[in-house]
Image (spheres, helix red, strand yellow):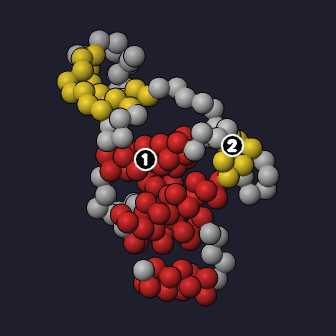
Amino acid sequence: MRCPYCSHEALKVVDKRDTEDNIAIRRRRECLKCQKRFTTYERIELLNIHVIKRDGSKQGFDREKIRRGLLIATQKRDISLDRIEDMVDSIEASIRSKNQKEINSSTIGELVLKKLKRLDKVAYIRFAAVYRSFTDLDSFRQELEKLEKR
């Protein structure tokens, strides 16, 4: 492994812990050359899952897509990166616990919405606007009304 800042190979682990759901090990590393720190995650390589998209096409499951969607939805909100990583880990664990080789993208989207609803209502609406493809103000208003009722 190399330092992402200076590409030096000499690193040391300064902290190591399991993630909340125990599916990964989080390591804080420090470069011995430039002294910058960064985080790595070690995960077990599990069953390949294929995601069935709305148009019927299939793609390999990519947890980074969930992470990017969460980062965009939570942008400028007071939500830590560690909290987002925990959510991604939890969503992935839910998907993998189904023990299926294929999953619909809509199932993944609903898992993300469920987590965001508990975490932050603004982030929930941001994600829902893209995920549910709001086409007009009425569809946006209906989603807000559903959120307020709960």
Q: Is residue 22 left or right of residue 33?
A: right
In which quadrant of the rendered view does residue 20 lie? top left
Structural crowding at the residue carrying mark 1, measured as other residues with C-alpha within 10 Å and reported as few (<14), some (14–19) or many (≥20): many
Could you say whether the residue bearing mark 2 is in a helix, strand or loop?
A: strand
Residue depicted at x 39% and y 72%: 121
Total tally of numbered discs in the picture: 2
Q: Is residue 12 left or right of residue 66?
A: left
Residue holding disc 2: 102
Residue depicted at x 47% and y 26%: 44
Is residue 61 something that shows in the picture? yes
Location of the C terminus by quadrant is: bottom left
Find residue 10 and report its horizontal and vertical position in percent: 29, 12
Residue holding disc 1: 90
Image vertical order of residue 107 relative to residue 98, above or below = below
Q: Nearer the viewer, residue 10 or 128?
A: 128
Residue depicted at x 55% and y 29%: 46
